[in-house]
Image (spheres, grey):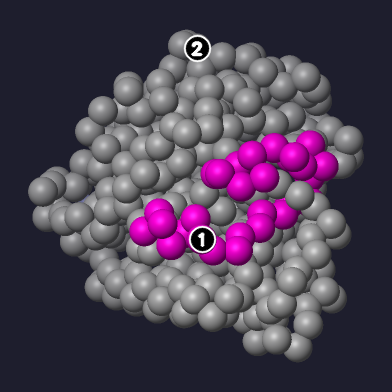
Amino acid sequence: MQCPLCNGPAEIVFRRCGQPGSVHMPPGQTVELAIAGCRDCGFFWNVDAFADPVAFTALLAPAYRAYNLLDNDLHGFPLVDERTRTAKGFLDAHCHWPALSYVVEVGSNRGDFLAYLKQCHAHLQLLGVESSPLSLVGVPTLFNDVHDIHFSPSFDLVIARQVLEHMADPLRFLLHLASFVREGGWLLIEVPVLENELAEGVDPWVVEHVGHYSARALEVLGQRAGLTLVAVEDSYQFSALFRRAPHPGPLFTGISNARWEQVRAFLAGVEEQQARWREWAEQGGAICFYGASNVYLAISAALRQAWGEDFWRDCRLTLVDDSPSRHAEEVGGLRVQSLESYAPEGKTLYVVCAMYQYHRQKMVPRVLARMGPEDRLSAMWTPLPR
Ligand SMILES: [Zn+2]
């Protein structure tokens, strides 16, 4: 098996069957998930998605159409959080803002990041590109699949934050973005950090995230799209800054085995938790999943596969979520209720299903406040001290 980015030697790491996919997909529809990893560049990817990007994109299209990432009622505009400031700080460190005028962001959502940049640099001319039809945006935005939009290479800065990891044909995507960048212009890419997700016990293998990049993987991909990687920053997110300029030589060489070791250790930890939770359920303990999210779908699909459908059906399972719009909906076979309305009988294992640290930080205290002496708490696959 060969890496789709660097052609290096690669192998399947694990398979999960019957993944329910995304919470936005029709109930009952499942997908197979096989994750492979590259020994050279450290790229991990969803094998089926990359084998047939067109079919995979079509499968997830209804899910992406139903996306509304930021609730207008809940967040003022522009929303400026820690991740926004980090991304801006990274650009500050490497770009000379007076030399930049025309900025386009792909996957701009409501335009929060662009509006924040404009607050800091009033001379910028902004444009957003967004595939989900949002009802409210704060910057001029084109609504379309970015691959159907064409510009001359005229932008000083192109931005794509938390988009590349969704792309089953990343080379096509990056080539397309590169075609927007003027000679000497910049491209900012931001993706999740696999190591952070693994270290936090977060299950990174949600169906929508098809590519898990390393610095070397991003550099190789950039080269193939005619872009030079000039800087990276590895904080909570992975930021990579490319330039449409001649290539001075590689910034990164092949990876160490650390990433592989971490993936293996994580998978062993998942198996251990699956066995412990099974024991818990066998002893009559209830399990309450908190967060009707894609993370819950990923966890529950892994459990169903490990435990078998019959055992899963006999467990005392509850699914709770904070969003009132989800309540009474069925997600992954369980009816969603509010955490407040959950009335446990006997001991309960609470499993917090949050992809992001800042979500989890809000959810864990709410569970701790409800827990009895016999109850237990896990954040994803990671057991937490009470
Ligand atoms: Zn590779």
Local packing at callout 1 (Cα closer than 10 Å; few below 14, some 14-19, many 20+) is few
- State if disc 1 and disc 2 touch (CB < 8 Å): no
Q: Position of residue 312 (x, y in %)?
A: 47, 59
Q: Nearer the viewer, residue 190 or 244?
A: 190
Q: Nearer the viewer, residue 298 or 88?
A: 298
Of callouts 2 and 1, which one flags the residue occurring earlier in the amino acid sequence? 2
Q: Residue at x 30, y 72 (%)?
A: 264
Which element is circle 1 on? helix
Q: Is residue 307 visible?
A: yes
Q: Residue at x 40, y 54 (%)?
A: 309
* Vertical relation: 358 (above or below) 190: below
Q: Is residue 59 magenta?
A: no
Which label was assigned to residue 149?
2
Taking the image as shown, residue 152 lies to the left or right of residue 258, namely right
Local packing at callout 2 (Cα closer than 10 Å; few below 14, some 14-19, many 20+) is few
Q: Residue at x 41, y 25 (%)?
A: 59
Which label was assigned to residue 314?
1
Taking the image as shown, residue 344 lies to the left or right of residue 195, namely right
- Range drawn in magenta: 308-335
Q: Position of residue 27 (x, y in %)?
A: 53, 32
